Amino acid sequence: MRTAFHPRLVAIDDQVRDMCGVVRGAMHAATAALSETDLGLAESVIENDAQLDTSAHEVEDRIFHLLAQHQPVAQNLRFLLAALHTAAALERMGDLAVHVAKTTRMRYPMPVIPTDLRGLVADMGAIASQMITTADVALERGDPSTARVLRDLDREMHRLHRELFIITCSPAWEHGVPAAVDISLLSRSYELFADHAVTIGERSVHVIPQQVNGSVNLR
Amino acid sequence: MRTAFHPRLVAIDDQVRDMCGVVRGAMHAATAALSETDLGLAESVIENDAQLDTSAHEVEDRIFHLLAQHQPVAQNLRFLLAALHTAAALERMGDLAVHVAKTTRMRYPMPVIPTDLRGLVADMGAIASQMITTADVALERGDPSTARVLRDLDREMHRLHRELFIITCSPAWEHGVPAAVDISLLSRSYELFADHAVTIGERSVHVIPQQVNGSVNLR
């Protein structure tokens, strides 16, 4: 029973970490498509999202069967419930990358972001990348310091969101209403993406089971 | 063991259903505060949100201990995993009601919504109310027809979101950029609220355990 349990636990951990990589790639590509007005790249983000939805359902299914058949307790149970939340959060983060990609597609061939704001939006994209990378490290190590790093990055993301909000709503704004609306909704998607990353970091603290942590020999 | 298990299952179901009622009240109050520019009501939504966060953590804790101590399988396990997702979704729906309330507070004493758009925003609020009420029925009955109703209401919510988007981005828009930005972000919060309600409906299909469904004598 134990030999069947450990590889299945590791397989769930692997799949969640793979989802993390897919989400990182999706948000990176969505931000690049936005910056470079690249329709093909935006389309690929939208198409690839189905893969994340499928993975989230598979993770959930695997967790259900592992709980039903092995009835894990303590640390292993805690890990599986955290993995369930993480998979759901990653699925929603993929949806937010799709929202960014769809905005590029909607305005194509016009760029969404006025030239003078590209730096700020690129900063949001860069923080989103750092956050999903840090969330992945949190999943790997369950270390409280990664949760703190995520909260700091989240504060910076909220600051950028407020800065963009103030710029678009100032009397000096000269790019018109549609650009202001697009930027506000995009900025909100990055902010929600950051919130999910924080949640992943918080949930992963102290939940790494021995079987996954010490699983070098199992892989 | 069974006598201890059933009341605990029912207690989790009760607490999730209570959270549903709190979320319904929060979004109803947030919409009323927005329509009537009522600062006190907006503040109460913001303050009361802590209660939802506490409940979500309690539900999660109860589920963890029930899984660890009773190792339920089949329908009961499925119900508990769905309850875990539902509590997390309700917590996020509460955050979206807080976002609506904070927009009212930010612009107070000015109203957020221009007079000619109050009808559309009121419609979004009404659909949000119907959706959380329907999600509650879905939790009670696990009936696939409620999931279908939720998807129909969700389509209507997306239609209203697009309608507001088109109005704010049209050349005829005369209320300025800040109003357009506020309305877009509010409308997005209602849309995300609807998405969560759909997820609750989908997850609740066929997961009502006998112990909860037939629990009249336990209550």
Image: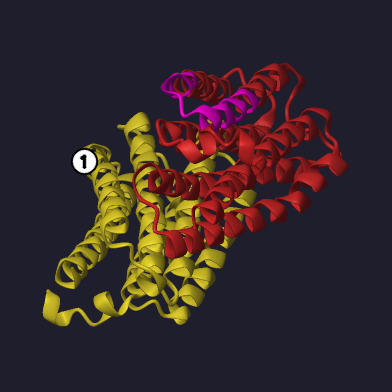
Chain colours: A yellow, B red
A205 or A20, nearer to the observer: A205
Magenta range = B129-149
Please determine whether, in this image, residue B194 is positioned above or below residue A134. above
Secondary structure character of the magenta stretch overall: helix
Q: Which residue is mark 1?
A: A44
Q: Is residue A101 left or right of residue B35?
A: left
Q: Secondary structure at mark 1?
A: helix
Q: Is residue B163 above or below residue A12?
A: above
Residue A172 position in % (x across, y down): 64, 45
Q: Position of residue A185 (x, y in %)?
A: 51, 41
- Looking at the rendered structure, the kind of residue marked 1 is Ser
- Judge the density around disc 1: few (<14), some (14-19), many (≥20) Cα neighbours within 10 Å: some
Q: Relative to B155, does residue B47 appear above or below in the rendering?
A: below
* Quadrant including the C terminus of chain B: top right
Asked whether residue B139 is drawn in magenta, I would say yes
Q: Is residue B14 left or right of residue B205?
A: right
Query: In x, y percent, where is residue B207?
Result: 42, 36
- x then y, percent, for residue A26: 28, 51
Of A169 and A190, the residue lying toward us: A190
| Residue at image point 44% right, 59% down | B70
The one nearer the camera, A21 or B51, is B51
Q: Label 1 lies in what chain?
A: A
Magenta run includes residue B169: no
User: Does residue B19 appear anywhere in the picture?
Assistant: yes
Relative to residue B70, is residue B181 drawn left or right?
right
Report the residue at 28% width, 59% height from top: A16
Of A30 and A72, nearer the camera is A72
Tell me the residue at 39%/39% (across/down).
A99
